[in-house]
Amino acid sequence: MNTSAKPTAEPPPPSKPPKPRPDVETVARKQLRFGWWSLLVFLTLGFILEVLHAFKVRAYLDVSNSTRRLMWTLAHAHGTLLALVNIAFGLTLQWLPGWEPRLRDFASTCLIAATLLIPGGFFLGGAYIHAGDPGIGIFLLPLGALLLFLGVLFTARAFARRKLPSAPSPTAGAKSSKGK
């Protein structure tokens, strides 16, 4: 038996997120709380829209109100998606413990504001229709879209700057098995 052979290297354990600082946990909790409550609100809005459809409410289903139906459906869909974005952001923060607090808080505020402005703009645009066009509330959308863009941009940049743990080299295992 050849005892001079080196034992095979054990693969490193799967990477775990670093332990977050208390200020990171505070922002993450805020984001998760806001995301889950927003999800409940926008899913409830979807349920209400289904009830309006089921009971054939004319203020919602008449052809003259197709703009309202579209705007409220867009409010529900965008609100639900943005609630999930907030939840994802809250879960992401544990992987970015070194993110500069000023930039992290700015991204958090942008995502929360976008979650209020985008669906709010669609909803208000559908609440007050003028000759088939959405109401003035629709003008909240560009600001909400800009804030959403900035929140996602700052989060993506924080991840791009983070050093991820390196994976084991595929040749490391091959070298140790040659001696057998």
Image (cartoon, helix red, strand yellow):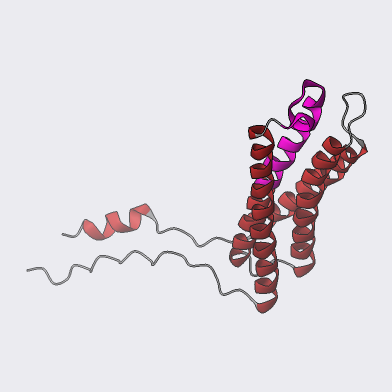
Q: Is residue 92 left or right of residue 128?
A: left
Is residue 67 found inside the magenta-colored segment of the image? yes
Question: Would residue 100 be seen by someone viewing this image from the given angle?
Answer: yes
Say above or below: 91 vs 4: above
**Location of residue 30 in the rendering, given as x and y in whole percent from the top left corner:** 70, 67
> Dividing the picture into quarters, in which one does residue 47 lie?
top right
**Location of residue 9 in the rendering, given as x and y in whole percent from the top left corner:** 30, 66
Going 56% across and 75% down the picture, which residue do you hit? 19
Magenta extent: 57-80
Going 61% across and 60% down the picture, which residue do you hit? 92
Q: Is residue 151 left or right of residue 95?
A: right
Going 70% across and 75% down the picture, which residue do you hit? 23
Q: How many marks?
A: 0
Hey, which residue is sitting farthest left in the picture? 1
> Who is closer to the viewer here, 125 or 166?
125
Is residue 140 found inside the magenta-colored segment of the image? no
> Dividing the picture into quarters, in which one does residue 138 lie?
top right
Going 66% across and 65% down the picture, which residue do you hit? 33
Magenta residues: mostly which secondary structure?
helix
Q: Quadrant of the C terminus?
A: bottom left
**Location of residue 43 in the rendering, given as x and y in whole percent from the top left corner:** 64, 48
Q: Is residue 74 left or right of residue 50?
A: right
Q: Quadrant of the N terminus?
A: bottom left
